[in-house]
Amino acid sequence: MQIVEVRLPRAEVAGRMDDMRHWLATRSCQHTLTSTGSSSESVVLVEFASEADAGDFAQEFGGSLVPG
């Protein structure tokens, strides 16, 4: 499993989460999506079964691969 972390300003969370869900759905990626945050920033963690999907997602959404 590979985890991607994406940090978002609070004001962008709703729109970017919609974009992420759409991206994941159109690619039928096996994933787990969670979100946490503070008043100024949210952290979205997406766990992928495929390292290739994780890399593509990180590149698309400005995320980083979490060392594991």
Image (cartoon, rainbow, N blue to C red):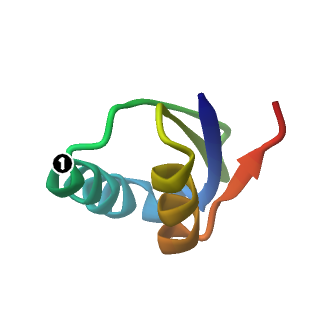
How many badges with numbers are in the image? 1
The residue located at (47%, 31%) in the rendering is: 49
The reply, left or right, for residue 53 in relation to residue 66 is left
Q: Label 1: how many residues lie within 10 Å, few (<14), some (14-19) or many (20+)?
A: few
Secondary structure beneath dot 1 equals helix
Quadrant where the C terminus sits is top right
The three-letter code of the residue at mark 1 reads Ala
Residue 63, percent across and down?
A: 63, 61
The residue located at (48%, 72%) in the rendering is: 60
**Residue closest to the far right:** 67
The reply, left or right, for residue 30 in relation to residue 10 is left
The residue under label 1 is 25
Question: Which corner quadrant of the image does residue 10 belong to?
Answer: bottom right
Residue 16, percent across and down?
A: 38, 62
Residue 57, percent across and down?
A: 48, 60
The reply, left or right, for residue 56 in relation to residue 45 is left
The residue located at (33%, 33%) in the rendering is: 30
Check the image and report above or below for 34 versus 8: above
